[in-house]
Amino acid sequence: MSGKPRLTYFNGRGRMESIRWLLAAAGVEFEEFFFETREQYEKLIKDGVLMFQQVPLVEIDGMKMVQTRAILSYIAGKYNLYGKDLKERALIDMYVEGITDLMQMILMFPFSPPEAKEKTLDSIKERATNRYFPVFEKVLKQHGQDFLVGNKFSWADVQLIEAILTVEENIPGVLSEFPLLQAFKIRMSNMPTIKKFLQPGSPRKPPADAHYIETVSRILKM
Amino acid sequence: MSGKPKLHYFNGRGRMESIRWLLAAAGVEFEECFLETKDDLTKLQKGGSLLFQQVPMVEIDGMKMVQSRAIGNYIAAKYNLYGKDLKERALIDMYVEGITDLNELLMSHTFQPADKKEQHFATIVDKATNRYFPVYEKVLKDHGQDFLVGSRLSRADVQLLETILMAEECKPDILAKFPLLQSFKARISNIPTIKKFLQPGSQRKPPLQEKDVPKVMKIFH
C-alpha cells in the first residue's frame, strides 16, 4: 500500500481528467488502474467496490470514493484549494459548476455522431464565448487579482485552466476576445505543479481517439 | 429587505425543489419569485442577476447564488447539515450525488415523448431498485443508525427522503423490498420541520402535470 491515491478509470480523459488535474495541481502523486475489458469492469461491480456501479473510482485515505464532484470536493478541501470560508466556497462552487456545464458539452463531443459534430462544436463555441468565458473575464477584471477567488490559488482556477486548454484544442483562438483570460492561462500554466502536469510524460491524458471511444462504448455498452 | 432567502424559479419542482427541501428541513423561512413567462427570465438575465443566464437563483446573505449544487452546498454548510468533518462531507457528497442522479431520472420522466415513456419508466424502476435504493438500505443496515451519516440529520437524509417520495409518486410500492428505507421514510417524515413541509399549504411543489409542460418549455426555450 503506497498511500498514494489510486484512480480507476479508462485510459483517457472522460470524467476522471478533472480529478487528475486537481491532484496534480495540488502536487499529489497518484497511481492509476486502467480498464480495457468489460470483464474487469464487471469484476469491480461484483466485488462491491463501486457504490453506484460506476467509475470514476478514487481510493483515497481509506475510502473508495465515487461520484466525480464528491471526489473533487474532498481533494479541494483536503489540499486547501476550497477557499478560506463559506462565502469563498460558495463562489468557488458557482464557478466550478458553471465550468463543469461547459466541460460536459466537451465530454460528450467525441461520442456524438459524425453528422452532428459540426453543430455540437458550434454550440460549444457559442456557450464558451457568450455564456462562460465572459463571466470569468469579468471576475478577473473586477478584482484585478491573479486568481479567481480570495487572491489565492483554488479549485476554480484549476478547473478554468483545464476548460480553457480543452476548448482551445477544438476551437483555437477561442480566447481572442478575452485578454485577461489569455494572461490567466499563461499565469496558471506557469505554476510549477501545473507546468509539470502540462509536460509530456505526465498523467495528463490526450483527447479522445478512436480506440478510447471504442473501449468506453464497448465496456459501458453505450 | 426581509433577510429571508429569496428563490427565483418557475412555480414547480425542477432544480429548485431540493433547495426548498433543504431550507425547510433547516427551519429557514424563504420567499419565492416565480417566473411565469419567457419575459420574466429575460428580465432577470438582462438585469445581470444570473451569473450564467440560468435559474435557479437564490438571493441569500447578500449573494445572488446560482447553480443548484453550489446553493445546496452553501445551505447545508450554513445550517449544519453537512457533517462534522471532511470525511463525513465526503460520504454525504457521494450519497447526495447518487440521489441526484436518480432524481434527474425521475424529473425527466414528464418530459419524455409519448413513445419513450414506458421504457423510461422501466429504466427508472430498474435503476431505483437495483442501483440506488440498495445502497442506502445497506448503509442503514450496516450501521443501524437513524441517519445516513454521523448519527445526525444531514442533507443526505433530506435529499433521500425527497427522492423516495418522488419515486413513490411514480410507483407506489417501489420500496417494497427495502424495509429499512420504509422506516427511514417514516422517521424522517416525522421530524418537525420536515413534517411541516409535507403538509398542505407548505412551499413544497406538486409534480409537474403533462398539461403544464408546454408552459415550462416556453419559459426556457
Image: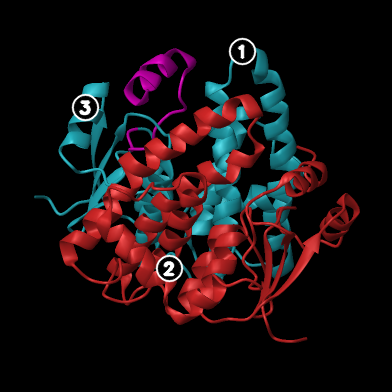
Chain colours: A red, B cyan
Residue B54 image point, x, y percent: 32, 39
Distance between the Cα atoms at labels 1 and 2? 42 Å
Label 3, residues with CA under 10 Å away: few <14, some 14-19, many ≥20: some
Give amino acid for label 2: Trp
Where, quadrant-wise, is the C terminus of chain A in this rendering?
Answer: top right
Which residue is labeled 3 in the image?
A: B40
Does residue A150 show up magenta in the picture?
Answer: no
Label 1, residues with CA under 10 Å away: few <14, some 14-19, many ≥20: few
- Residues A138 and B50: in front is A138
Which residue is labeled 1 in the image?
A: B114
Residue B196 image point, x, y percent: 38, 45
Does residue B211 show up magenta in the picture?
Answer: yes
SS for dot 2: helix
Q: Given the current orientation, which residue lies at the most extreme bottom position?
A: A2
Distance between the Cα atoms at labels 1 and 3? 30 Å
Which of the two marks, 2 or 3, is nearer to us in this view? 2
Distance between the Cα atoms at labels 2 and 3? 33 Å
Label 2, residues with CA under 10 Å away: few <14, some 14-19, many ≥20: many
